[in-house]
Image (tube, helix red, strand yellow):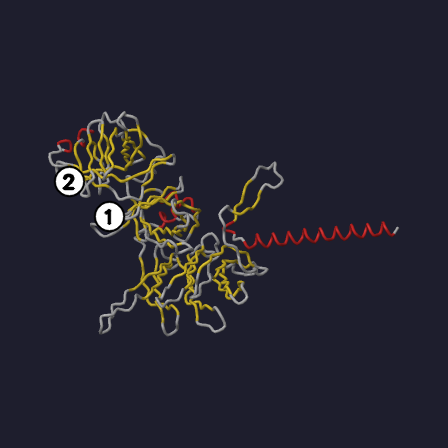
Amino acid sequence: MKRVLRVVLALAFLFSFVLFVFFLAKKTRANLEAALPLAARTVLIAPSSQPEAVQIREEEEPKPRAKVLLLWDEVLLDAIDMNLDEDLELEQILVVRDFSSKTGAISIVIADFFPSVGSYYRVWKGESLATKPTIFVVQPRDLLGDGSIDLLCFGLDEKNLQTLTVFKPLASPVGVDYKKVFSGSGLSIRVEEEADTEQDGNGYSPPASPLISVFASAGNKASPLDQVRLVYAWDRENAEFGLKSQEPIPSEAVERSYIESVLTGKPEEFESYIEGLWRKVGSPGKEPTMVYFAPDTRNVSIHSKTEKQVWNWGPSTFSYAGIYTSIVNSGVPDMVRILGVDLLGKDKIRLMATPGQAVKFPIREDWNGTYERVRGRSKAPEGSLRRVNTGSAIDFPVQDSSQGVFLEIASIAGEYTTPDGHALSLSQNEFAYREGALSYKGTYPFYSYGQQLILDFEVQDSRKIPSGRRSFFVSLRREDSESWGIVLDPAKISSLGVEHLYEPALVFSASEGNQGSR
């Protein structure tokens, strides 16, 4: 009997120990999953025959986890490692949402590393006005030029208005502390700089003063496009941003019926409206920035004098006068922008871009400004190449013109050169191209890609065997009344279509005596 009792007690102890280990492992796993930001989790849709149809797993790339425990009512949305002070250790910014909060506002928590104990501790928490977790950006920036790293929190609230909350670090003897120096919402918000023209006796000019422009609705009875610009400037006395001026912005006399047909509250309908090519309203004589919206392929292309890029278009969120969306550079996944598109008038929009969390890639693209629709070129480009029949006239695009020109191949045959030594020779059926020490020779078929023309050099060796290709977007430019120049913009042809390469365009001029260009 005693032996049986000992066996029963041993089995009960073993069973209790197994249960303890199981629940401890389950709790540990739950803590690890909670420490992984929602932005780094992937939802997998599995076949219904499997026991678990939906699973959550981590991406293959390592993602930052929360280095401090969350409170019972907090859910982690994102985790960002960055250096906010003068020490060598990285602080961690946690983007969280409180379930117990009545407003549902998104907050940021700062965790600092203490070398004396070798671990991270929660040191500060601040609440923003944003409520939408999909459109939220924490941007570290020395806003006042005083050497301190301010935290700019961009987002959207429950009314789909853009929000901005600025936290400024304070000198505190007890640890890290921040003060909220600006908090506001509007149709759109832009951080600008105002140059200070005052100089001292030595000709020194103080650094530019920061301005925050908030575009708000002019009133309930006005047109939705009637706006007022509220300008906030830094108030040194109160150590915060205060209202400096107000500027009314009329609505371009757009009819309310037209406005309501575009601003329906559905992001996909506004995306269909902005589909196509838009030209930035700029100074005369400068090459304008062109932006192309392609909702079907979820791409946004920007083409300017210095940039030719294709961006992946993420989900859009409807705002008061347009949409907000996140875009990611197709070639550099860490390059993220929050793009705001606002309707200003009939066939007129305003773009404003905000960089993402990491400031590895500051904005160089010329996004911000007012754009007008380019008529006649709003159709989306086709996703396939079509060989052009060279036996008849070809519709060549012409630079700085919305109209092309029909020319025979014989009309462009001849010798061409560039100022930096590139040479191009075109005959009726073959080409010869010299680029430094490299030379190419072969046939040159033309392809149409939507409304663009592709010149594809099929390189051949001495035995007439194809050995490579060199592709360009081709256009013509008028040199004088009788001759044309050729502009070749390097391109890459792949299964996904044709993309611009990050190389300068080659501008060829017709050589003297080139009869083919006349």
Q: Residues within 10 Å of mark 2 (few under 14, many from 20)?
A: few
Which element carries disc 1, helix, strand or loop? loop
Q: Position of residue 481 (x, y in %)?
A: 12, 38
Q: Earlier in the sequence, mark 2 or mark 1?
A: 1
Which element carries disc 2, helix, strand or loop? loop
At label 1, the amino acid type is Glu
126 w.r.t. 484: above or below = below
Q: Is residue 479 visible?
A: yes
Q: Report which residue position mark 1 lands on.
A: 287
At label 2, the amino acid type is Glu
Q: Position of residue 194 (x, y in %)?
A: 29, 64
Q: Are marks 2 and 1 in contact (CB under 8 Å)?
A: no
Q: Report which residue position mark 2 lands on.
A: 479
Q: Position of residue 144 (x, y in %)?
A: 35, 66
Q: Residues within 10 Å of mark 1 (few under 14, many from 20)?
A: some
Measuring 39% from the left and 71% from the top, which residue is drawn there?
Answer: 239
| Left or right: 386, with 127 as reference point | left
Quarter of the rendering containing residue 386: top left
| Left or right: 167, with 283 as reference point | right
